[in-house]
Every structure is written in structure tokens, then in C-alpha cells.
Image (spheres, helix red, strand yellow):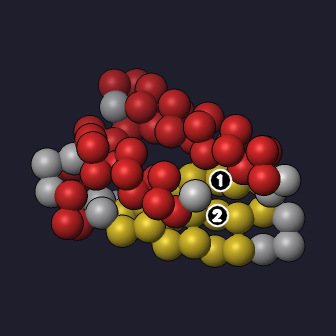
Amino acid sequence: MKALIETMAKALVDNPDAVKVTEIEGEKITVYELRVSSPDLGKVIGKEGKTARAMRTIISSAGTKIGKRCVLEILE
């Protein structure tokens, strides 16, 4: 899942080396924190948050397939 998030984020940003994904695992939920450089933050969020919403939908669906609830947080 972590690799999936990194791949999606690196395809969107200008500085792919600054993309970092941290995984925080709980019993029933896994939180993924995505960090990108400040100039690339808008590209990851997208117009009206549509890109971020699409990424969250993909992560949620992939998590359902493996039996876990997955949440994506985009941090500055």
C-alpha cells in the first residue's frame, strides 16, 4: 500500500525525491501520512480537492480488499 501511494504521488509532483510516506498501523485501521514539498502540495490536493479525494478512494478500496481500513492524510 505504501508503494502504491508513493507511486501515485511521485507521478503528480515536480520533486519526486521529496515524497515521503509514513505508515501508522493500528488494530483495525492503518493511517498513511503523505508528505511532499510545499510547492507540490497543490498538485497532490488538486482543484477543489479532487485529486486527493481520488487517491483516498483508491487507498480505501485497496484496503478493503486486504481487510483493513486505510486512511490517507496529506501533510505539509
- Image quadrant containing the N terminus: bottom right
Where, by quadrant of the figure, is residue 25 drawn? bottom right
Residue type at tag 1: Val
Q: Let me know if residue 18 appears in the view.
A: yes
The one of 19 and 42 positioned closer to us in this rendering: 19
Q: In this rendering, is residue 25 above or below 4? A: below
Residue 15 position, x and y percent, is 15, 57
Q: Could you tell me how many numbered marks the image carries?
A: 2
Where, by quadrant of the figure, is residue 51 drawn? top left
- Residue position marked by numbered label 2 in the rendering: 31
Residue 28 position, x and y percent, is 85, 64
Q: Residue at x 20, y 66 (%)?
A: 17
Mark 1 and 2 residues: CB-CB less than 8 Å, in contact? yes
Label 2, residues with CA under 10 Å away: few <14, some 14-19, many ≥20: some
Q: Residue at x 23, y 66 (%)?
A: 18
First in sequence: mark 1 vs mark 2? 2
What secondary structure is marked by label 1? Answer: strand
Label 1, residues with CA under 10 Å away: few <14, some 14-19, many ≥20: some
The one of 48 and 66 positioned closer to us in this rendering: 66
Q: Residue at x 27, y 41 (%)?
A: 12
What secondary structure is marked by label 2? Answer: strand
Residue 46 position, x and y percent, is 34, 31
Q: Does residue 12 appear to the left or right of 49 in the view shown?
A: left
Residue type at tag 2: Val
Residue 71 has which mark?
Answer: 1
Q: Does residue 68 appear to the left or right of 30 in the view shown?
A: right
- Image quadrant containing the C terminus: bottom left
Where, by quadrant of the figure, is residue 49 drawn? top left
